[in-house]
Amino acid sequence: METWSRSVADRGRDAVRDRGRCRLADVTLTREQELWGVALWVEKAHGDRGPSFIAGKIDALARSGEKDGARLWQEVARRFDRLADRQEDDRSL
């Protein structure tokens, strides 16, 4: 029985079933979609600890001189905050 697992190298691709076989199809995401995807992943993987996880990423990257990486995670943080705001709004209804 053939199994297929998604790895980091497979990011950006989707499995497509074709007559019992699995093939990969390229999927192109915008930068905005990528950032939202990372924010959603942080929410799912880290939940309430998401802000501290993101802050740790930003801090580590800034300390190592990776300014672009730190900026990327700052963008993720903005989107993560918007997700949290949305959830609070939903709870107040």
Image: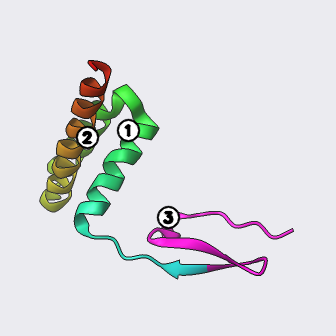
Quadrant in which residue 5 is drawn = bottom right
Residue with the most extreme right position:
1
Secondary structure beneath dot 2 equals helix
Q: Which residue is mark 1?
A: 43
Q: Where does the N terminus fall, quadrant-wise?
A: bottom right
User: Is label 1 or label 3 in front?
Assistant: 1
User: Magenta stretch: residue 42 in it?
Assistant: no
In the image, taking residue 77 as reference, residue 4 lies left or right, namely right
Identify the residue shown where x is 41% and y is 34%.
46
Under mark 2, the amino acid is Phe
Q: Residues within 10 Å of mark 2 (few under 14, many from 20)?
A: many
Residue 80 tag number: 2
Identify the residue shown where x is 21% and y is 39%.
82
Count the numbered circles shown: 3
Secondary structure beneath dot 1 equals helix
> Start and end of the magenta stretch?
1-23
- What's the image's color scheme? rainbow
Residue with the most extreme top position:
92
Q: Which residue is mark 3?
A: 8
Secondary structure beneath dot 3 equals helix
Residue 77 place in picture, x, y as percent: 21, 43
Residue 68 place in picture, x, y as percent: 15, 61
Q: Are marks 1 and 3 in contact (CB under 8 Å)?
A: no
Under mark 3, the amino acid is Val
Q: Are marks 1 and 2 in contact (CB under 8 Å)?
A: yes
The image shows residue 13, relative to residue 76, as above or below, that is below
User: What whole-number distance in Å separates the C-alpha atoms at marks 1 and 3?
Assistant: 18 Å
Q: Residues within 10 Å of mark 3 (few under 14, many from 20)?
A: few
User: Magenta stretch: residue 14 in it?
Assistant: yes
